[in-house]
Image (spheres, grey):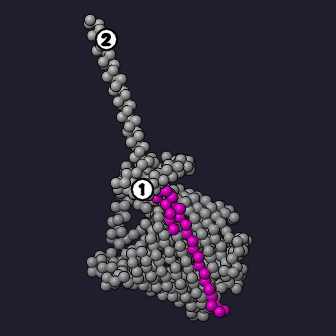
């Protein structure tokens, strides 16, 4: 009797365990089915419309599809990341960035701003002194700034001195006024001739000294659009470079002997009138991940004091930044076009013509064609296209590391009728860019093209 009773109890326990397992399996299958229904069916009372839900599902599938491909491309950059991680953590643990930032902010607050940069012309050191802050007159002179800069580039022995007072939003209007003086000793510059067919064997060398006085006005149409007007006087001297001087043992041609009929070979004096319009919808002007920027400029240049310079200048600068599934991956495209049209029998001085070659940031110093020498090509007109794919492969607090792959295509020409497909020059390559607070502090890139390979390290990006 006791044995039967124990067997009955054991049977009931086994039955309860069996029923528990069945119930658990049933609930699990029910929840899985409910999840499937939730992702495949549509609730008419849901806060998201059917179209928006389908779009989200489609976007999720595309991201899941592209993720393995992106991870494969990211593998080579993981080596750089592994090397950078311990260095960054050590620097951060000792609070070095905070200490340097504090010192920099203290100096800047008092009106003294030291800087180190390389924007394509060579490593430069300098000082920007804001006179109004230095004299502690911000409260008495609100909206007034007066920047005075000194910059020296050791590689090319270049020197710049400038002073630029400005009054922002006069009487709380969108109008701002500015003035400026700038003296620039450009040191040695290379020159290979005019046109797309100029060869490296024609290389010469010259030195340029430039003095400028400007008066300008800015009008803020709205938060993203601005109109500008500038009036200026420019004086330029051209001298033989040291590399072409036999007394200095130079091996390059004397520019005045090699190009005796070159426009502006003896310098020039000009009066300039320049009108511009700029529209900027980038989400960040230092490291944009989306948006676009357009700039158009029209200028008239008139020679004085015996100069034969007289020409119109037309300029277009367009750029767009498109996220590729994520703001960590950005396709950046930029087109720049410039045309200088001389009037009658007058001329455009060669140093004010459109220039192509190098990795400069400022178009006035030459347009980027990164596998070529700086200012490799000169002519009245230029068209250049720069395409970059930027991928943020590492992010730690205020630090970011981007990998970039780029392609440049450009040509200089005299008239639009002379554009030829065979005269286009291209370069391609890639590299890395380091950012702190979205400001580029170091860029290392390598570029290859028809005339060889260039490797460079710099600050800032070409656009």
Q: What residue sits 60% from the left and 90% below the top?
A: 310
What percent of the width, then of the height, locates residue 210?
54, 82
Q: Where is residue 331 in the image (x, y as percent from the top left)?
A: 53, 62
Identify the residue at horizontal 47%, vertical 85% (top origin). Answer: 230
* Residue labelled with disc 2: 7
Q: Based on the displayed image, in which of its 4 quarters is residue 450 positioned?
A: bottom right
Q: Residue at x 55, y 60 (%)?
A: 389
Look at the image and say whether residue 167 sits in the magenta stretch. Answer: no
Q: Is residue 49 left or right of residue 247?
A: left
List the single residue furthest toward the top.
Answer: 1
Viewer-side residue, 449 vs 352: 449
Q: Is residue 337 magenta?
A: yes
Q: Is residue 287 left or right of residue 337?
A: left
Q: Where is residue 252 in the image (x, y as percent from the top left)?
A: 69, 73
In x, y percent, where is residue 125?
48, 68
Q: Bounds of the magenta span? A: 320-346
Residue 172 visible in this rendered orientation of the protein = yes
Q: Residue 393 carries which label?
A: none
Under circle 2, the secondary element is helix
Q: Specify the label residue 50 is tagged with.
A: 1
Q: Assign the N terminus to one quadrant of the image.
A: top left
Residue at x 34% of width, y 19% of height: 14
Q: Residue 260, located in which quarter of the rendered image?
A: bottom right
Could you tell me which secondary element the residue under label 1 belongs to?
helix
Indicate which disc, 1 or 2, sits on the residue closer to the N terminus.
2
Residue 193, quarter of picture: bottom right
């Amino acid at each position: 009797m006791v044995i039967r009773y124990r067997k009955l109890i054991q049977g009931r326990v086994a039955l309860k365990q069996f029923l528990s397992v069945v119930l658990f399996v049933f609930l699990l299958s029910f929840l899985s089915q409910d999840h499937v229904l939730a992702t495949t069916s549509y609730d008419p009372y849901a806060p998201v419309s059917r179209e928006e839900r389908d779009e989200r599902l489609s976007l999720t599938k595309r991201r899941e599809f592209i993720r393995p491909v992106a991870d494969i491309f990211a593998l080579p950059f993981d080596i750089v990341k592994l090397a950078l991680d311990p260095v960054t953590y050590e620097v951060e643990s000792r609070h070095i960035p905070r200490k340097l930032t504090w010192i920099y902010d203290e100096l800047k607050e008092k009106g003294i701003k030291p800087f180190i940069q390389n924007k394509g012309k060579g490593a430069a050191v300098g000082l920007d002194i804001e006179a109004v802050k230095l004299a502690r007159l911000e409260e008495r002179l609100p909206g007034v700034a007066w920047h005075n800069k000194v910059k020296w580039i050791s590689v090319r022995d270049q020197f710049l001195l400038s002073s630029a007072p400005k009054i922002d939003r006069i009487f709380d209007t969108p109008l701002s006024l500015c003035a400026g003086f700038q003296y620039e000793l450009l040191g040695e510059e290379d020159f290979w001739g005019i046109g797309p067919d100029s060869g490296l064997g024609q290389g010469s060398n010259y030195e340029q000294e430039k003095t400028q006085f400007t008066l300008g006005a800015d009008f803020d149409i709205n938060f993203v659009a601005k109109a500008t007007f500038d009036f200026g006087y420019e004086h330029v001297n051209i001298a033989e470079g040291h590399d072409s001087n036999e007394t200095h043992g130079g091996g390059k041609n004397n520019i005045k002997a090699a190009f005796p009929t070159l426009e502006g070979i003896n310098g020039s004096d000009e009066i300039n009138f320049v009108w511009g319009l700029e529209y900027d919808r980038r989400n960040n002007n230092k490291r944009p991940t989306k948006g676009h920027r357009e700039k158009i400029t029209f200028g008239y240049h008139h020679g004085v004091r015996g100069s034969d310079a007289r020409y119109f200048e037309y300029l277009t600068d367009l750029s767009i930044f498109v996220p590729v599934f994520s703001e960590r991956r950005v396709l950046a495209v930029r087109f720049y076009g410039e045309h200088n049209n001389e009037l009658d029998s007058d001329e455009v001085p060669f140093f004010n013509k459109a220039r192509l070659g190098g990795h400069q940031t400022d178009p006035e110093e030459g347009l980027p064609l990164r596998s070529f020498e700086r200012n490799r090509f000169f002519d009245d007109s230029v068209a250049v296209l720069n395409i970059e794919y930027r991928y943020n492969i590492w992010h730690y607090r205020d630090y970011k590391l981007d990998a970039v792959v780029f392609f440049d295509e450009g040509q200089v020409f005299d008239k639009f009728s002379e554009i030829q497909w065979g005269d286009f020059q291209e370069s391609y390559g890639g590299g890395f860019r380091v950012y702190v607070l979205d400001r580029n502090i170091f860029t290392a890139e390598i570029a290859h093209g028809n005339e060889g390979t260039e490797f460079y390290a710099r600050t800032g990006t070409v656009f």
